Amino acid sequence: MTIDELLQRLDIGEDQETELKSAAGGLPKSLWETISSFANTNGGYIILGAVERKNDVEVAGVSNPKTIIKSFWDTHNNPQKLNIPICSETDVQTINMDEHKV
């Protein structure tokens, strides 16, 4: 995803293909439900570090992307969480947006 594609998705907000989630306290617990939902459809984008509030998107970013990504892969590859790993390395990326990382 390019910065322009990210900005476009943030401008639209949440829809059938885009889910925005705060990651202030680490990976959101609802992340895995969203991944499962997307796996049962045509897929989608989960943007961590952004939330929709009153029809506006607030971008706070994530404080430690490397830790978040490691936690994601550790849980993603745990067969007790996901029967079959469904994401690949190219599905996860960090994008710099002003002073925030999403």
Image (cartoon, rainbow, N blue to C red):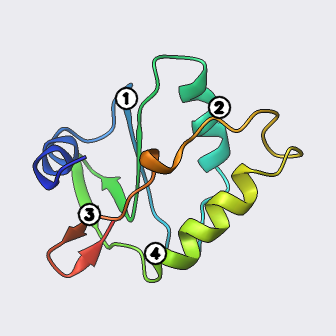
- Mark 4 or mark 1: which comes first in sequence? 1
- Mark 2 or mark 4: which comes first in sequence? 2
User: Alpha-carbon neighbours of circle 2 within 10 Å: few (<14), some, or many (≥20)?
Assistant: few
Q: Which residue is mark 2?
A: 36
Q: Which residue is mark 4?
A: 65
Q: Quadrant of residue 40?
A: top right
Q: Residue furthest right?
A: 80
Measure the C-alpha gap from mark 2 to mark 3. Answer: 25 Å
Instruction: Report the mark closest to the observer, 4 or 1.
Output: 4
- Residue 26 vertical placement versus 50 (above, below): below
Measure the C-alpha gap from mark 1 to mark 2. Answer: 13 Å
Q: Residue furthest front?
A: 89
Q: Image point 76% across, 33% down: which residue?
A: 84
Front-most of residues 67 and 17: 67
Q: Is residue 11 left or right of residue 38?
A: left
Measure the C-alpha gap from mark 2 to mark 4. Answer: 22 Å
Measure the C-alpha gap from mark 1 to mark 3. Answer: 18 Å
Q: Quadrant of residue 16?
A: top left
Measure the C-alpha gap from mark 3 to mark 4. Answer: 18 Å
Q: Which mark is residue 17?
A: 1
- Mark 3 or mark 4: which comes first in sequence? 3
Q: Position of residue 42 (x, y in %)?
A: 46, 17
Q: Which residue is mark 3?
A: 58
Find out whether the residues at labels 1 and 2 contact each other: C-beta distance under 8 Å. no
Front-most of residues 52 and 17: 17
Front-most of residues 96 and 32: 96
User: Alpha-carbon neighbours of circle 4 within 10 Å: few (<14), some, or many (≥20)?
Assistant: some
Instruction: Report the mark closest to the observer, 2 or 3.
Output: 2
